[in-house]
Image (spheres, grey):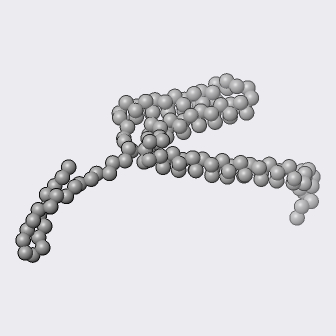
Amino acid sequence: MSARAPVSDGRHAETVQVEVVHDHHEAGHGSRKEYITGFVLSVILTAIPFWLVMAEVFSDSRVTSLVIMAFAVAQIVVHMVYFLHMNARSEGGWTMMALIFTIVLVVIALSGSLWVMYHLNANMMPMSPGDMRTMP
């Protein structure tokens, strides 16, 4: 696309050609079908863990917790793909790099916190309820 703009230097007017460049990033918006697909997947990924807990499908609460966490991770991926439109192509891949960096930081913070809490619990002196009565 080009446009002609008059330029005057005081003596005479001349016309120069100005090139208009639009810098489009590949950050497209989703279609209605993609939003509906994301919504339906989100509802399903919410309803299944709710049913697992309410119907007491698993007798062990740890198994139930792990299954719910797996559904939570799947729902995070659905939200990132269908609602945030994050992929390796958008904005030259920088959104994916930011996501990877964030995930690395969260994993480091969570694993470090769990490690510290586990070792604090393991290395604390055990106290019986009788010992608590004599505390000031």
Viewer-side residue, 67 vs 18: 18
Viewer-side residue, 63 vs 1: 1
* Residue 52 x, y percent position in the rendering: 63, 27
The residue under the point 54% across, 32% down is 46
Location of the C terminus (image quadrant): bottom right
**On the picture, is 90 further left or further right than 50?**
left
Viewer-side residue, 72 vs 91: 91
Report if residue 78 is visible in the image. Answer: yes
The residue under the point 67% across, 52% down is 109
* Residue 14 x, y percent position in the rendering: 9, 65
The residue under the point 37% across, 37% down is 30
Question: Outermost residue, bottom direction?
Answer: 10
* Residue 12 x, y percent position in the rendering: 6, 71
Viewer-side residue, 127 vs 86: 86
* Residue 27 x, y percent position in the rendering: 39, 44
Report if residue 54 is visible in the image. Answer: no
The residue under the point 13% across, 67% down is 7
